[in-house]
């Protein structure tokens, strides 16, 4: 409980980081989605057939749209892949600043944030490449487990297909979440010991992760599960709003709710980082303990 | 009207000639679950022929899925034709068995032939295979090749084509271990002696005698307007029984009311009786795959409806599944859509999750979109060279074509058409030309269009509104004053495009700002056209084919041009896509 309270304090102290990261994510998504709006608005807004889209997510309309703009889907996928890669590098860059910020006992100015981001970029990139291997292995394992679900629990069409896909997704998440926590621990260790080589970082970080496995996972699910519930509530509310109003006001309100959900997702992730950062700092030491020690010495 | 009546009579006379000429098959066979084979004999007594017979031809459909020299499919042990033994002279080529006759048989002269055979089941074959404590036997004995006025018809099967056979009167005596349960249509008696059961089967006007040997099946029997609807299921599939009963009942009632009264006294559905996904139509019997427990959307029910409709289109109207597959599958799938709409009281939603919708017809539009100008649906089955093209053309494009054709007939015309079609070809084999000739009679007379134009359609058809311009003009106040005293008259100028229209009329609608709707009918030729209106209120929308009668239309989005009616649709898509991309980034990289 004390760890959670410390985490909240840490998160509140650096709340601006959540805001900026959400805005970064939104901006990158808009760069991707705005051209789509430009392409389809003329077609959809002038068509009586498309009006059902104001009420439901009509795949009939989307199908007609894709058929009419056959060039859109390949371009959409290509741009999505491009942006995923761009976001990957951008994330590795800001990671250094984020983990440094949540580890530091004091406030962090923008200049130090970016200085740490640049300084830890290579280290974070190495961790990501290592984690890519771990994620891929776990993803394959998760899908092998998902494939063992009896066939009559899933299906190939309609809701049944959603049910089947949902079960695969749940399996994937259950396998990837422990890796995601390990990734956070590795990055926090890197922020504490920026000069150590990757292999030297790995063993103490893994030891720390294994010793506090239950605590780390408990904290993660403490934030993650309410976020999922919030996401479901928002999704249902958005559907009720748009379905009920069936006009541009409903669409606008749904957009606001979606963005609220997106911000909640960013906050949930950072809240977890903010919660385990003090734990890591206490246990692994490094430059932040020296910093803390010197601050305490000055107070004495 | 008289011409219509006379042609109907003529068709009935032709069809009745076929009924009189129905073949008789007597099968005597024993099933051995240890060797997974069934062996015995089939006695063939052909109906009267108008040509001299120099040979007899049979089909060995299961051999299509066998490699040579393997214990697979139907093996011929010996043959007797009349008093001769032509075993050494028979020819087996792929799925064809040719039995030469030493003495040609004159028209009207009787002949009979007996073939001794052994048929092997294969695990990989869902039609003639075995699974968990069950054995499926469809098309398991040699059946006579189709016979037409010109003689025997050779069918060049491809693996995705279903078997075709003329209807015959079949009697069968089946021997099998009494530890097994036999599910089959037309069962007359079953006797058990010393560990062996003997079942006698009798079926009139059937293309085969399907058998399902199994254990542990329970029976749910319902009377549907005098027909015994028998559902066989195992305990673990019992959750689907109510769904299947409701779907099959709805289909039986709809088809009996709208097309032709079901002429047989039973229909069997075996739930979980097929190893592969989907369903398999057999005479008076449907083999349905094991249902998934998470199916709630009615997909399984939709499949059951499709297979029940097959009892009319292939079972009663004996449309050739290989020769004219569209008459079989396109028509059946079209009726499945109609019954689905009636059951859902609107367009059935195939998704129904997270506010998403997708209707059944639109699914066919999606599947058929790349095949609208590749192959006409009226090609013979053997002319399709790959499975994807076959399925997408016959099932999806075919459904759109039948939907378009019948929409042009109007409700009453369509109802009469299907009744006359089914009456005319009951137990007979229609060809595309027969269907087209009859359908043409029910299309709007003033247009003089031919149904064949639609059936052979193989081009991208599109109706589109290109522009809608309105202007208010000050004119002579005396002549153009409205009731309210306004002296303004609005002029609307609408440009529309008709790309490869089918030669039939198409509806055109203009909506004015004051809510007035002006409906008219166009007979467009290919190209760009302009239509002008003078109205008391400005036009805010123009729609061509407002009821979407032309399911073949390449693009429904451009059928209308509106001012503000769907403003926000693009924004919603944008909002959803943005959120999806944000969620993807969050999942991939953490925040």
Image (cartoon, coloured by chain):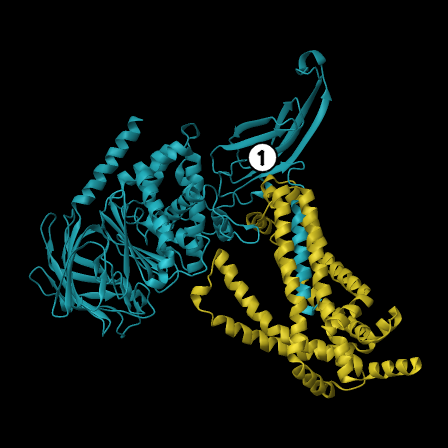
Chain colours: A yellow, B cyan
Q: Residue at 79% of width from left, 61% of height from top?
A: A19
**Residue B497 is drawn in which quadrant?**
top right
**Residue A245 is drawn in which quadrant?**
top right
Q: Is B584 displayed left or right of B170 in the figure?
A: right
| Quadrant location of the C terminus of chain A in the rendered image | bottom right
Q: Residue at 75% of width from left, 61% of height from top?
A: A22
How many residues crowd around disc 1 within 10 Å: few (fewer than 14), some, or many (20 or more)?
many
Q: Is B177 displayed left or right of B338 in the figure?
A: left
Image location (x, y in percent) of residue A134: 63, 78
Helix, strand or loop under label 1: strand
Q: Residue at 65% of width from left, 73% of height from top?
A: A218
| Quadrant location of the N terminus of chain A in the rendered image | bottom right
Q: Which residue has dot 1 on it? A: B543
Res B47 seen here: yes
**Residue B478 is drawn in which quadrant?**
top right
Q: Residue at 61% of width from left, 33% of height from top?
A: B542
Label 1: chain letter: B
Image location (x, y in percent) of residue B436: 36, 40
């Amino acid at each position: 409980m004390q760890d959670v309270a410390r985490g909240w304090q840490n998160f509140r102290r650096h709340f601006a980081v959540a805001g900026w990261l959400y805005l970064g994510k939104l901006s990158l998504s808009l760069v991707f989605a705005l051209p789509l709006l430009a392409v389809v608005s003329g077609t959809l807004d002038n068509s009586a057939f498309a009006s059902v889209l104001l009420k439901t997510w009509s795949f009939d309309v989307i199908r007609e749209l894709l058929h009419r703009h056959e060039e859109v889907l390949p371009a959409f996928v290509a741009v999505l892949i491009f942006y995923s890669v761009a976001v990957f590098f951008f994330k590795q860059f800001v990671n250094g600043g984020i983990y440094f910020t949540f580890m530091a006992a004091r406030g962090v100015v923008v200049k130090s944030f970016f200085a740490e981001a640049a300084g830890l970029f290579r280290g974070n990139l190495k961790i990501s490449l290592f984690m890519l291997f771990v994620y891929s292995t776990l993803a394959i394992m998760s899908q092998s487990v998902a494939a063992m679900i009896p066939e009559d629990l899933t299906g190939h069409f309609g809701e049944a297909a959603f049910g089947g896909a949902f079960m695969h997704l749940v399996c994937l998440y259950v396998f990837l979440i422990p890796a995601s926590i390990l990734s956070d621990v590795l990055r926090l260790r890197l922020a504490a010991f920026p000069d150590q080589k990757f292999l030297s970082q790995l063993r103490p970080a893994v030891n720390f992760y294994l010793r506090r496995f239950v605590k780390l996972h408990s904290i993660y699910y403490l934030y993650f599960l309410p976020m999922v519930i919030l996401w479901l509530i928002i999704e249902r509310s958005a559907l009720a709003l748009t379905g009920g109003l069936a006009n541009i006001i409903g669409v606008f309100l749904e957009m606001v709710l979606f963005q609220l959900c997106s911000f909640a997702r960013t906050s949930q992730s950072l809240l977890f980082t903010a919660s385990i950062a003090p734990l890591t700092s206490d246990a692994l030491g490094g430059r932040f303990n020296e910093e803390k020690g010197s601050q305490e010495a000055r107070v004495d | 009207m008289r011409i219509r009546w006379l042609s109907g009579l003529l068709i009935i006379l032709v069809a009745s000639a076929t009924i009189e000429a129905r073949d008789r098959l007597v099968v005597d066979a024993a099933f051995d679950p240890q060797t997974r084979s069934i062996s015995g004999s089939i006695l063939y007594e052909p109906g009267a022929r108008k040509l001299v017979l120099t040979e007899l031809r049979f089909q060995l459909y299961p051999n299509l899925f066998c490699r040579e020299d393997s214990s697979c499919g139907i093996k011929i042990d010996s043959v007797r034709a009349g008093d001769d033994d032509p075993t050494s002279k028979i020819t087996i080529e792929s799925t064809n068995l040719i039995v030469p006759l030493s003495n040609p048989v004159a028209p009207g002269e009787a002949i009979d032939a007996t073939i001794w055979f052994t048929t092997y089941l294969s695990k990989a074959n869902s039609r003639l295979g075995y699974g968990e404590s069950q054995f499926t036997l469809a098309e398991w004995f040699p059946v006579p090749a189709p016979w037409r006025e010109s003689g025997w018809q050779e069918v060049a099967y491809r693996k995705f084509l279903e078997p075709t056979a003329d209807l015959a009167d079949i009697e069968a005596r089946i021997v099998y271990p009494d530890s097994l349960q036999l599910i089959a249509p037309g069962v007359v008696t079953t006797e058990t002696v010393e560990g062996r059961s003997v079942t006698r089967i009798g079926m009139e006007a059937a293309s085969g005698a399907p058998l399902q040997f199994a254990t542990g099946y329970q029976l749910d029997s319902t009377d549907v307007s005098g027909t015994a609807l028998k559902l066989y299921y195992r305990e673990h599939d019992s959750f689907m029984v109510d769904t299947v009963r409701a779907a099959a009942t709805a289909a039986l009632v709809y088809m009996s009311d709208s097309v032709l009264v079901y002429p047989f006294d039973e229909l069997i559905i075996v739930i979980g009786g097929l190893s592969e996904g989907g369903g398999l139509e057999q005479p008076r019997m449907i083999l349905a795959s094991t249902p998934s427990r998470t199916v709630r959307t009615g997909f399984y029910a939709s499949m059951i409806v499709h297979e029940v409709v097959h009892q009319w289109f292939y079972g009663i109207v004996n449309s050739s599944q290989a020769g004219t597959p569209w008459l079989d599958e396109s028509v059946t799938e079209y009726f499945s859509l109609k019954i689905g709409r009636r059951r859902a009281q609107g367009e059935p939603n195939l998704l129904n999750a997270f506010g998403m919708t997708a209707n059944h017809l639109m699914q066919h539009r999606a599947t058929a979109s790349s095949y609208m100008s590749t192959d006409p649906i009226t090609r013979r089955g053997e002319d399709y060279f790959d499975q994807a093209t076959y399925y997408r053309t016959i099932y999806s494009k075919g459904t759109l074509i039948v939907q378009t054709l019948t929409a042009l007939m109007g409700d009453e015309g369509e109802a009469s058409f299907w009744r006359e079609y089914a009456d005319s070809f009951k137990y007979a084999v229609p060809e595309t030309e027969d269907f087209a000739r009859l359908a043409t009679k029910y299309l709007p007379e003033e247009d003089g269009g031919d149904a064949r134009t639609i059936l052979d359609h193989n081009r991208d058809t599109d109706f589109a509104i290109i522009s809608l311009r309105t202007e208010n003009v000050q004119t002579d106040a005396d002549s153009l004053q409205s009731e309210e005293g306004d002296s303004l008259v609005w002029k609307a100028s609408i440009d529309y495009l008709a790309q490869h229209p089918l030669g039939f009329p198409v509806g055109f609608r203009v909506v004015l700002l004051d809510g007035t709707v002006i409906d008219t009918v166009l007979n467009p030729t290919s190209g760009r056209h302009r239509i002008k209106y003078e109205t008391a209120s400005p036009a805010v929308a123009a729609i061509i084919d407002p009821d979407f009668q032309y399911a073949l239309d390449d693009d429904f989005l451009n059928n209308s041009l509106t001012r503000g009616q769907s403003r926000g649709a693009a924004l919603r898509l944008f909002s959803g896509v943005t959120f999806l991309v944000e969620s993807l980034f969050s999942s991939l990289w953490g925040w």
